Amino acid sequence: MVLSISRTLMVPSSATAPEAAPLPVIRTMLLWALVLGSVGMLTELMLIGHRESTAQFVPLALLGVSVGVGAMNLRAPVTSSVRLLQVLMVLLIGSGVLGVGLHYHGNEEFEIEMYPSLSGLALVKETLTGATPVLAPGSMSLLGVIGLAFTYRHPALRARADLAQSQEKQS
């Protein structure tokens, strides 16, 4: 039973006999996680009205583009769409880090305004548990890492590198 499950999941049954990982299946799973995660996060941000300023609109735009580019790669990944996804994922990671900073700063300003004498660890605690979820934008970074994992050594990128190498050899 355990052996059949491990073979189904492509998990090595022992350390001495590793099986080849089903990379296309793993890539597809990562890409679906990215697309569905982006749809979910985009929906949630729209429902909570996360569009009051330009800074709040940026994650909406990035997530919307992520859904589109992810769908392109689900359909037929080519070099340009995989590269576009890489750039977009770096932007998602940066947006997540920046969002955590913005949420923290906004909560901190609010707490200081409400309780001017608050400082030190008490201020940090109140800031982290404030009205705006400080760590929520980190989900954007997580989606970015998932997308980059999909592109890691992607065959569409290798095909172009192989073509360039063969052209260099012919010169």
Image: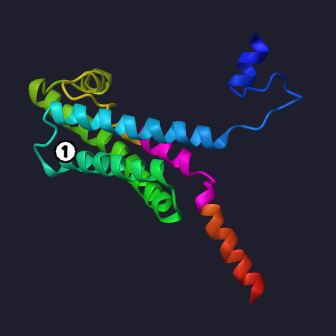
Whether residue 108 is visible: no
The residue wearing badge 1 is 56
Residue placed most toward the observer, 171 or 118: 171
**Neighbour class for label 1 at 10 Å: few (<14), some, many (≥20)?**
some
Q: Which of 103 and 159 lies nearest the eye of the viewer?
A: 159
The answer to whether 164 is drawn above or below residue 108 in the figure is below
Between 43 and 75, the one lying in front of the other is: 75
Q: In this view, does 45 lie above or below 170?
A: above
Compared to residue 139, the image places residue 71 above or below, namely below
Snapshot colouring: rainbow
Q: With 14 as the anchor, is 157 left or right in this view?
A: left
In the image, 41: left or right of 149?
A: left
Question: Residue 129: percent from the left, percent from the top?
Answer: 26, 21
Front residue of this view, candidates 159 and 83:
159
Provide the residue span drawn in magenta. 142-156
Q: Where is residue 31 drawn, in percent x and y?
A: 48, 42
Residue 145 magenta-highlighted: yes
What residue lies at 31% left-to-right and 45% top-to-bottom?
63
Magenta: main secondary structure: helix
